[in-house]
Amino acid sequence: MRVQRARSSASTPHSPLTRYPSRVMGGGTGTTPFPARAMPWLLVLYCAASLLHFVHNAEHVATYPNLPNWISSGSIYFAWCTISAIGTCGYVLLRRRHPRAGLSVLAVYALLGLDGLLHYSRAPISAHTLAMNLTIWTEAVTAALLLGAVLWLATYRLPMRDVRDA
């Protein structure tokens, strides 16, 4: 009986996408939604913007206003590597048929991109140079775009699990 139910749900258009992760990214439907097509590009764009911001932080750590003394170039590069590893894990999980976990980790990765705005909790925008502000805002905007795509995919492409499937 259980095998028949699995077969019948697999043939219906409303089957859980967790069983068919290619549909999360739009591959199984014939038409791929824009957020799914944009996801790899948004990841690359955000990763590049994040790298730019972290390199600028590391190379100009002494000139960023009111940063704690314990923050060094090495700790900044280590933080970027750690954050990027989180994003890589999320994308790998997504592509390896774990869409809920992958999208959750990618949401965390995108949210970490918004932490650059915390520079403004230490000093106002006017205390930062133009280059500082540009790298901070570029990272934040690209992170917000990535988060929007992740949330769209999680909301519209992953239906709630049916109680009978649990």
Image (cartoon, grey):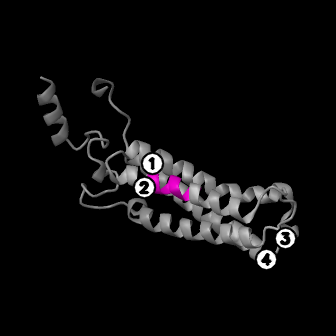
Rendering coords of residue 159 (x, y %): 36, 40
Is residue 88 in the magenta section?
Answer: yes
Dot 2: what SS?
A: helix
User: What's the CA distance linking mark 3 and mark 1?
Assistant: 36 Å
Residue, disc 4: 130
Name the amino acid, label 4. Leu
| Residue 109, percent from left and from top | 55, 53
Instruction: Name the spot of residue 4 as percent of width and height, x first.
Output: 11, 29
**Badge 4, how many Cα within 10 Å: few under 14, some, many 20+?**
few
Q: Foreground mark, 3 or 4?
A: 3
Are dots 2 and 4 in contact, CB under 8 Å? Answer: no
Q: Does the segment drawn in magenta span residue 17?
A: no
The residue identified by callout 3 is: 63
- Which is more toward the observer, 137 or 132? 132
**Which of the two marks, 3 or 1, is nearer to us in this view?**
3
Q: Distance between the residues labelled 2 and 3?
A: 35 Å
Q: What element carries label 4?
A: helix
Asked if residue 14 can be seen in this view, the reply is yes
Q: Which residue lies furthest to the front in this view?
A: 74
Q: Is mark 1 on a helix, strand or loop?
A: helix
| Quadrant holding the N terminus | top left
What residue is disc 1 on? 103
Q: Which of marks 4 and 1 is nearer the N terminus?
A: 1
